[in-house]
Image (cartoon, coloured by chain):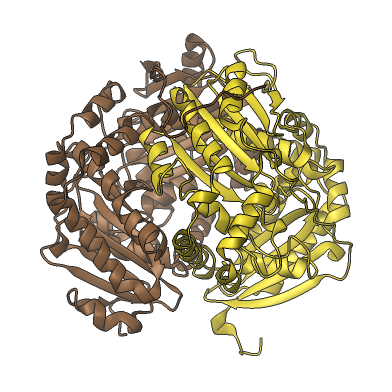
Chain colours: A yellow, B brown
Amino acid sequence: MVSRSGKAVVEFKLRERTLDNGLRVIVQEDHTTPVVSVHAMYHVGSKHERPGRTGFAHLFEHLMFQGSEHVRDEAHFKFVQDAGGALNGSTWFDRTNYFETLPSNDLELGLWLESDRMGFFESAITQEKLDNQRDVVKNERRQSYENRPYGLAVETVLHMAYPEGHPYRHPTIGYMEDLDSAGLEDVREFFRTFYTPDNAVLVLVGAVEAERGFELADRYFGEIPLGPGAPQVTAPTVPPSAEAREVIYDNVQFPRVYLFHHAPAFGQPGFEAADVLSYPLALGKSSKLYRKLVYEQRIAQDVAAQVWPTEDCGISFIVATARPGVEAETLESAILDTLDEVRGGRLTERESRGGVNRALQALVNMLGGVGNRSDAIATSATFLERPEYVNDIFSRVASVTADDMVEVANQWYVPGRRATLHVLPSASKGNGE
Amino acid sequence: MTAGAIDRSQRPASGPAPAIRLPRINRFELKSGLKVLAVQHDDIPEVSTRIVLPYGSVQDDGGKAGTALMTARALTEGTVERSAGDVAEWLDYLGARLKLDVKYDGTQLSFRSLSRVFDEALELLAEIVTRPAFVPAEVDRLRDERLDEIASGRDEPRVVANLRLNEASFDEHPYGMRTGGVEETVRNIDPATLSDFHSRFYRPDGATMIIVGDLPEPDELEARLESTFGGWEGRAVEPRTLDQPQGAEARRIRAVPWPGPQSEIRVGFVGIDRHDPDFFAAILMNSILGGLFSSRINMNLREDKGWTYGASSRVDARKYRGHVYAATAVESGVTVDAVREILAEMDRMKTHPPAADELKLAQNSLTLSLPRLFETPGQVSGRLATQILYRLPDDYWENYADSVRAVSVADVQRAAERLLPTDCAAIVVVGPAADFMADLEALGSVEIRDKNGRPAEL
């Protein structure tokens, strides 16, 4: 990609060093803005949870903000806000991350906070904090899932798409009843097992010299002992089988169709092709599904497609909401016709180029800020052991062709790899439809 | 490598504060009167091009609320040169993205593209902004889509709560109307409504273009803009002026029955306009009350009681007196207790003024975050747009930190007295109302509304 200012490509120069305790430290210097992102990613997520303890990895993430040995209760947020920083954490199937963006002169504050909860967390945890955050998380589940239209659709689809015992079968937020069963001993054991330096990566992006970044990382994290070796979990690819189908009812007025397909995992062959295919398929007003469902036939209010960046086996969704008076079946068959078209090779060179262009724009935009960039670097390091993959994404996306997309559709977007969910208005239940 | 012992008992000392990278703005005006602010910000090969119009939904004809929003949406649905489908195809082929933001006092059209297609993107932007066709069939479709969107909003308790609060706080004032209009008003909009709005307000003399990113040389940029936007002509009509909204004289409590595990709660007041001398006192008061994670409301409702995933407050200062409100969603069993706690925290802002370190934290969070808020082209452009829309001085961001630091504890307390008259609060609860009606009535008389805001029975 040639920019006006003469930059040939977007390429981030990465420096990496591993501390004696196994903590991988990656620095990407960027002095254009006096900020720095401190990003700690642990290789543990909802897929590592034991049966009956769904939601635990996420509940644990909440506890990590409740203070550690040298950071008093409730002080973590205050320190970062008092420094003008922003912070958060998130839990995914395969990893959990914690990050702050700080003015560059407070880099050490971020390192102090992250190292204290990596090395000195256990003494600060109490039953009271666990109970409080359990209540908070239950309210998060109510707010973001149960009391939101279509909010339970994704967890229903995951349950349909994966067999009993599969690590991706349950949602990261977990089930209400499982949240109740977590105790303090679970918290301690989880921490000792997974929150070890050798199961983590620390990424610093922004106004920090690499050598100083390594030196400070060693000073703050170096004394934390190596862990016993976190047991890793690999979610197996699900072999093709009969399409799973279900109907659920929700407090909504309009039917919505979820078409889940198994897909390539993050960084695996076909991942970028599947990601780029989302554009000519459903993103943008020129996309096939928007044109057909929303613009021409006017049967849908909206349509979208996305591929989720998972580590082991991939997840993709096509979702469309019906206009008033339109049945879910009508939407579904229009989507399936379009998938047939794509599988049959009806994807023009121009549609394909447009998809690549939109994907590149989204990528450049996303990686422009130090926060998202550190996340992408940490994800590449954690899932692929290759932080520099963050740079490969540009060329991989840029080189996706129409043939690649047709191939990925033929391999993945087929009935044997599909789970179809219709979410219908509760009011229509029992009307014999 | 060896780890030297460090003292973990103390927060590490901060290094010397870095210089903030405030944008260096190249200001010029095209022959048409269009004002341009250009900022070279070339960390990444991207350009953010934003057109700011100081005219928003309050310019809608009252019976046709939704006009400003639909006019903006119609821009891409066909021009004098191209059909809607062709515009969509070209926009998508370029990989450009258009984001529309229509608020009460202003309209922003933000266009993002890679810098390698900047020329083409600029031409397309000029085409859709200056030469839209408002084709009847497309406008009819947009109107149906807007009606669908309004209907779908009724499935979302948080949307219902926001809309009902707006009505309760602003009553008949235009700020009480939804920016995108309601079913009855949207139905009255036709192609002529949109082309009329466009001809009155989409004019170069009122507009400002903010271009941030990996830009061409200044001379070349100006030439490109003259050649693309040079044909834009005409003068905008004088916008409608409004009376200042007035706060209620008594509590207005409205409950919308909603079956669900949580209740959405809103507590609101008519606040301040953007030029109010108490603006900085108000935003600091808000940071202490509910603007930050560690603010009082969130620490109480979430971190102490575990009733919610989050509780927050906001000061939305507009051209006229805007909104001050608190929002949360709580487990429905504690609905009225949560309303009481929010009101109590608001009163406590007056009786328990912030401790010195509480004010200091709020000031630091607003001032030390400045480097972070000018990082990406989109952020820079957004901050400049606020300056334009509210006619803030050119040196606004240069002086921002001093203005924040000048606020005293007494100022915060005064702002709380002024902005949080809890006896006259608008209170909206969307939840299983039958379960808590009796308790809620202890706070004042309660009106039951349906999801659309119409009077209803329990």
Q: Is residue A368 left or right of residue B180?
A: right
Q: Is residue A98 above or below residue A343?
A: above
State the residue in front, B250 or A139.
Answer: A139
Left or right, residue A313 beside residue B248: right
Quarter holding the C terminus of chain B is bottom left
In this view, the residue in front, A181 or A352, is A181
Q: Quadrant of residue A304?
A: bottom right
Q: Is residue B447 visible?
A: yes
Residue A112 percent across, percent down from the top left: 50, 33
Residue nearest the viewer, comparing A104 with B66:
A104
Image coordinates of residue B30 in percent, x first then y, are: 39, 18
Q: What quarter of the picture does the N terminus of chain B occupy? A: top right
The quarter of the displayed image where residue B327 is located: bottom left
Which image quarter: residue A377?
top right
Identified at 49% across, 70% down, the residue is: A147
Q: Quick one: which residue is furthest to the front in this view?
A: B5
Give the residue at x 78% y 39%: A384
Residue, x 24% and y 39% (percent of image)?
Answer: B359
Q: Position of residue A415 (x, y in %)?
A: 84, 65
Figure disc tally? 0
Task: From the top left corner, tell me how far across and down residue A390 is, in percent.
Answer: 71, 32
Left or right: A216 in relation to B430: right
Note whether residue B120 is visible: no
Is B294 on the left or on the right of A396, as rendered?
A: left
